[in-house]
Amino acid sequence: MSDEFPSNPVELAADLTIAWLGNQNNRIDAREVPAFFRTMHETILELSADPPRAEPEDQPSTDEFIPAVSVRKSLASRDHIISMIDGKPYRTLRRHLSTHGLTPEEYRKRYNLRPDYPMVAESYSVQRREMAKKIGLGSKGQIGRKRQPKSS
């Protein structure tokens, strides 16, 4: 291929189609090639035409996020919290939020939630609390030691 790009949209579409078909990872039936070429040509014409038009006003802006479920439904079960992002149940939301690039505070702000909105399901929180007590977390070394009286 030469260093110059073809100025004719048909030539450019042909070159792109040939390059795409030359890739070993792309498998396409010979009957589908003309449709692919037409689609490529139409796309090139659209991109080379006028600058993109502004989006219609009736679409919500990117700052407004529509929750997948209501707050009441998200906290309806003791065993899980339903995410307002995708409507799926999670025992803890922290990792799920991080995959979407959010902190718990940003999540609460995005969906107008109270600051005390939980990030962990109630039953899972109880289970973790019991496990922590069982292994002695938070006891500050008092288990197994007798308290010595204060000397005055």
Image (tube, rainbow, N blue to C red):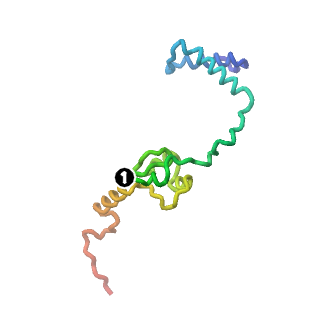
Residue 100 vertical placement versus 131 (above, below):
above
Tell me the amino acid under the disc marked 1: Asp
Task: Say what secondary structure mark 1 lies in.
Answer: loop
Query: Could you tell me which quadrant the N terminus lies in?
Result: top right
Q: Quadrant of residue 46?
A: top right
Residue identifier under label 1: 79
Seen from the viewer's position, the closer of residues 59 and 91 is 59
At which x and y percent is residue 79? 36, 52
Residue 19 vertical placement versus 92 (above, below):
above
At which x and y percent is residue 9? 70, 19
At which x and y percent is residue 62? 62, 45
User: Left or right: 51 with respect to 124?
Assistant: right
Seen from the viewer's position, the closer of residues 98 and 41 is 41
User: Left or right: 138 with respect to 57?
Assistant: left
Q: How many marks?
A: 1
At which x and y percent is residue 56? 69, 39
Seen from the viewer's position, the closer of residues 92 and 76 is 76
The residue shown at (51%, 20%) is: 26
The residue shown at (66%, 20%) is: 41
Which residue is farthest right? 50
Number of other residues with Cα within 10 Å of mark 1, as a class: few under 14, some 14 to 19, many 20 or more = some
Query: Could you tell me which quadrant the C terminus lies in?
Result: bottom left
Residue 59 vertical placement versus 25 (above, below):
below
The residue shown at (47%, 45%) is: 87
Which residue is farthest bottom? 152
